Structures are given as C-alpha cells and as structure tokens.
Image: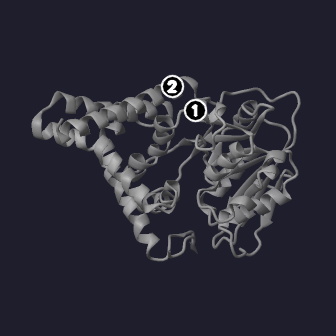
C-alpha cells in the first residue's frame, strides 16, 4: 500500500467521522426557541465584564433592559476602561433600577483580567441564576425567557452559542470555524450524557449557572489564570458530577466578535494554544491534520484528476457548509475552506511567536508570559 493510498484512507476516515458527528449534532443539538414569559420568575443576575467597550456597550445594555422576562438585575463591571464604557452604559440604562454599574478593583497577582472581573460580578450578584455574557452580545427581547426555558432543574451549567455576525473576509473565513469545530468534532450526546470531562465545551459569550453549582465548582476563583476559562468551567462541571448542557442561540443572541482581520488574528491567536492544552506539538499536529483533510485532496486532484481526491475535497466543503447553515452563516463560504485553513495556520504561527516573546497582549494587558 503506497503512502498516497494510506493518506487518502486516513482523510476518508476523518471526513466520515466528521460527517457522522455533524449529522448527529444537527439532529440532537438543542436550539433556543421563543417562549412567553414564565408564570414564576426567579431572580436572574445578568453579569457583564467590560473593558474598553464604549463602541458597543450602549446597544447591549439597551437590548438587555428590553427583555420580556420580568425579574432580573443587570450588573456591568467597568474593568478600568480607557474609553467611555461606563458613561455610555449609564446613559443607555436611563436610570433603570435593574441596572448597576460596578468599578473593578485592581487586578491582583495570579488572575487574568476577565476572570477577575467575573469573580467580582459573582460576589455582587443577588440572583440564584448567574448569566455571564460579553459586552458585544446582543439580546432580542425574547432571548432571556428562551434561555431560561432551556435551563431545566437538573442543569448546573448551560452554555449558549450566540449566532455570529461576520462581515469582513477575515471574519467570514475564521469566525464560523468555531461553530464548525463544535458541530463536526464534538458529538453533543456524550457532552450531555457521558460523565467524562473530555466531552465538554462552552462559549464564554454566554454562560448560565445555577449559583449553588457555580460555587460548588469553585467559580472563577478555580480558573483565575486560565485563558479558556469557559471550557475549563465546563470540564469542572462534569468533573464535579454536575449536569452540563449546550444550546445554539438560533439568532436570539447574536455577537460580532471582531471587525477586521488583525482583530480576528490576534483574538484567535490568544486562545488557540490554550485550546490545544498549551502544547506546541499538539498545535502542530492539529495544523498538519487540517492541511491533510482540507488541502491535500485539492492538491491531489489538481495533480492527478483523481475522482477520489475530488470526492474528498467536496466532502470537506460539504461538512463545512452544513455546519454553516445550522449556525446561520453563509454556506457559500465553505468553498473557501482551504483558505480558511491557511489563515488558521497563520493564527497558529502568531500564537507560537507570542509563546516565545512574552505572550499576547489583549485590550492593553499582557495575558501571557514567556516559558
């Protein structure tokens, strides 16, 4: 058996597993649905850590205060912003008694900025349900009732995937890969029903905790120095024997993460190494895997005209397109999946560079250190 045949069989098997995983997730991955306000309404604390978010914070506060759910408080912690985040948030709240503005305390040693901000918010919150959400997440008026309807009595952590808004080519080619990775690589049924922390995921743009469970797993104190605190909290949930659930926001929550290629590159580069267990060999193997699965078939087809190669190339595009439809992205962008992989490799290279040059900076802070 030649090396070419072995490689082709490997890619075939990988795409088959991805396809089966994606189809199962299309069938079983929960989605938020519009719901009327509930008859009984426990107090919900909506918690927003914000640093230099003046551009978006006004519309975010406005969308949250327009919720049809009747009983919530909205806390925003201004984490030493260098812009008008606090001023614009207060202006958008228009004196609404449900809104409280907190000013962050100095960042202590051993903490990352966002985790410290979330910890302070949790201490100030009064609700039995804690919702941590990012400053750039927009909420439709029916979002909170829909979200709470998905939070059954046994669930300790509900992780929501907001619908991503992408406009520039850098956003379109990279941001939807988050949804692709979840739907094609992580079967949701083991996440929901298997006890192993390896089957865990979360999106820090919206995390919904029952307070008792949040405190039981140690809250953000337990992830003080963790860059991917969302995934780590999800794993800690399962490790504690508590119930983790995932759900797609189905356009009831939306988010535009970044607005340019440099922002996309740096935003993903600050997390990608941590997402690979902080292991350079694992990151390099991941890059090689994606080159083999999504680039090799097209190179093989161009050189030989092989129908097998063409089928593999189209299969990769097909899996990417199916996940795009589910997550309300542009399916036609799947045709550029090879370019997405090349850009993802550029992001990985940025992460490796930072690894040996002091770590990434984000919003004016150093969030990594040299090895």
What residue is shown at x 80% (from left), y 45% (from top)? 213
Element assignment for label 2: helix
Quadrant in the picture for residue 152? top right
Count neighbours of disc 2 (C-alpha within 10 A) and say few if under 14, some if 14 to 19, many if 20 or more: some
What residue is shown at x 41% (from left), y 29% (from top)? 19
Residue 287: where, in percent of width, then height?
Answer: 36, 52
Quadrant in the picture for residue 44? top right
Query: Which quadrant, please, contains the N terminus?
Result: top left
According to the picture, the residue beneath numbered tag 2 turns out to be: 24
Q: Is residue 331 visible?
A: no
Q: Earlier in the sequence, mark 1 or mark 2?
A: 2
Q: CA distance from mark 1 to mark 2?
A: 8 Å
Quadrant in the picture for residue 227? bottom right
Count neighbours of disc 1 (C-alpha within 10 A) and say few if under 14, some if 14 to 19, many if 20 or more: many
Q: Is residue 363 left or right of residue 79?
A: left
Residue 38: where, in percent of width, then height?
Answer: 83, 28
Q: Is residue 198 visible?
A: yes
Element assignment for label 1: helix
Residue 333: where, in percent of width, then height?
Answer: 35, 39
Q: Nearer the viewer, residue 201 or 88?
A: 201
Residue 63: where, in percent of width, then height?
Answer: 69, 45
Q: Nearer the viewer, residue 191 or 165?
A: 191
Is 309 located above or below residue 96 in the figure? above
What residue is shown at x 57% (from left), y 32% (from top)? 188
According to the picture, the residue beneath numbered tag 1 turns out to be: 188
What residue is shown at x 66% (from left), y 63% (from top)? 114
Is 229 located above or below residue 113 in the figure? above
For the image, the number of numbered tags is 2
CB within 8 Å, label 1 to label 2: yes
């Amino acid at each position: 058996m030649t090396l070419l045949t072995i490689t082709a069989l490997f890619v075939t098997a990988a795409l088959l597993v991805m396809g089966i995983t994606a189809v199962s997730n299309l069938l079983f991955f929960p989605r938020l649905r519009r719901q009327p306000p509930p008859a009984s309404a426990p107090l919900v604390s909506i918690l927003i850590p914000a640093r230099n978010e003046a551009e978006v914070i006004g519309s975010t506060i406005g969308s949250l205060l327009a919720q049809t759910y009747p009983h919530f408080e909205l806390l925003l912690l201004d984490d030493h912003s260098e812009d008008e985040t606090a001023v614009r948030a207060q202006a958008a709240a228009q004196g609404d008694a449900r809104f409280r503005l907190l000013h962050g305390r100095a960042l202590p040693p051993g903490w990352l900025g966002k985790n410290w901000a979330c910890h302070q918010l949790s201490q100030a919150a009064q609700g039995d349900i804690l919702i941590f959400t990012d400053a750039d997440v927009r909420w439709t008026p029916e979002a909170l009732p829909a979200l709470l309807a998905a939070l059954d009595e046994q669930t300790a952590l509900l992780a929501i995937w907001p619908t991503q808004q992408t406009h520039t080519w850098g956003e379109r080619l990279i941001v939807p890969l988050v949804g692709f990775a979840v739907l094609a690589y992580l079967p949701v049924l083991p996440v929901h029903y298997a006890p192993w922390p390896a089957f865990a995921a979360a999106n820090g743009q919206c995390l919904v905790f029952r307070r008792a469970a949040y405190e039981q797993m140690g809250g953000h104190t337990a992830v003080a120095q963790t860059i991917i605190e969302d995934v780590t909290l999800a794993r800690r949930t399962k490790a504690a024997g508590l119930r983790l659930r995932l759900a797609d926001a189905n356009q009831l929550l939306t988010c535009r993460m970044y607005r340019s290629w440099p922002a996309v590159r740096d935003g993903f580069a600050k997390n990608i190494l941590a997402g690979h267990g902080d292991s350079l060999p694992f990151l390099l193997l991941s890059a090689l895997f994606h080159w083999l699965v999504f680039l090799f078939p097209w190179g093989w087809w161009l050189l030989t005209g092989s129908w097998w190669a063409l089928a593999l190339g189209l299969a990769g595009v097909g899996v990417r397109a199916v996940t795009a439809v589910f997550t309300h992205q542009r399916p036609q962008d799947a045709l550029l999946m090879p370019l997405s992989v090349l850009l993802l490799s550029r992001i990985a290279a940025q992460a490796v560079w930072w690894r040996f040059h002091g770590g990434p900076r984000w919003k004016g802070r150093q969030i990594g250190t040299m090895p």
